[in-house]
Image (spheres, rainbow, N blue to C red):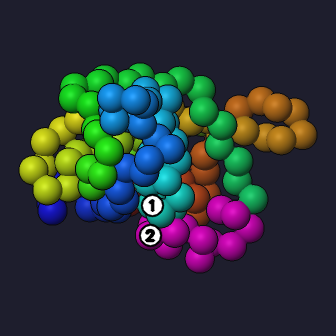
Amino acid sequence: MTRPGFSFSTRFKVRYAEVDAQRIVYNSRYLEYVDVAIAEFWPWTGLEDLGPEWTEAEFHVRHTEIDYFKPFVMNDEIEAFVRIERLGGTSMTQRFELCHAVTGDLHCMILMTIVHVDLETGRSKPIDGPVRKALEKLVAA
């Protein structure tokens, strides 16, 4: 399925361990779905070709907003759409739209701000050089 404003998506099914007695997905699982989607998104971007500039870059979650519209239930197939919404000086915001893979209905929208971090100091650091150039090409692509 395609979705306006998104070049990347991945699909997976709701599993038994992710639902409650009513067969509805636990709220906390939606962030796990984001983790699955982003683990597929980064290799798709080709940023690993930058070598250590990218593979040694560290980003930490700073803020997350979640809008739940409709619950997923047991055996639903989810299509997770991912894009970089905004690229700042030291952070970026990613947008995730979790849709029903068959109907296309939007079930959940998540905005996540991640900060580029210097591991030695624990402080934010600029996103620059080849990493910035590569990320700029991905913003809302």
Residue at far front of view: 21
Magenta stretch bounds: 43-55
| Numbered tag placed on residue 30 in the rendering | none
Mark 2 — residue?
A: 44
Residue 47: name its quadrant.
bottom right
Q: Say which element carries label 2.
A: helix
Asked whether 40 or 6 is in front, the reply is: 40
What is the C-alpha distance between the residues marked 2 and 1? 5 Å
Residue at 44 percent across and 47 percent down: it is 16
- Locate residue 120 relative to residue 49 in the image: left or right: right
Mark 1 — residue?
A: 41
| Quadrant in which the N terminus is drawn | bottom left
Q: Position of residue 91 (x, y in %)?
A: 55, 36
**Magenta region includes residue 44:** yes
Res. 5 visible in picture:
no
Residue at far left of view: 103
Dot 2, how many residues are within 10 Å of its Cα: few (below 14), some (14-19), or many (20+)?
A: few
Q: Say which element carries label 1.
A: helix
The answer to whether mark 2 and mark 1 are in CB contact below 8 A is: yes
Res. 11 visible in picture:
yes
Residue at 42 percent across and 37 percent down: it is 19
Tag 1: amino acid: Phe
Tag 2: amino acid: Trp
Q: Position of residue 113 (x, y in %)?
A: 50, 32
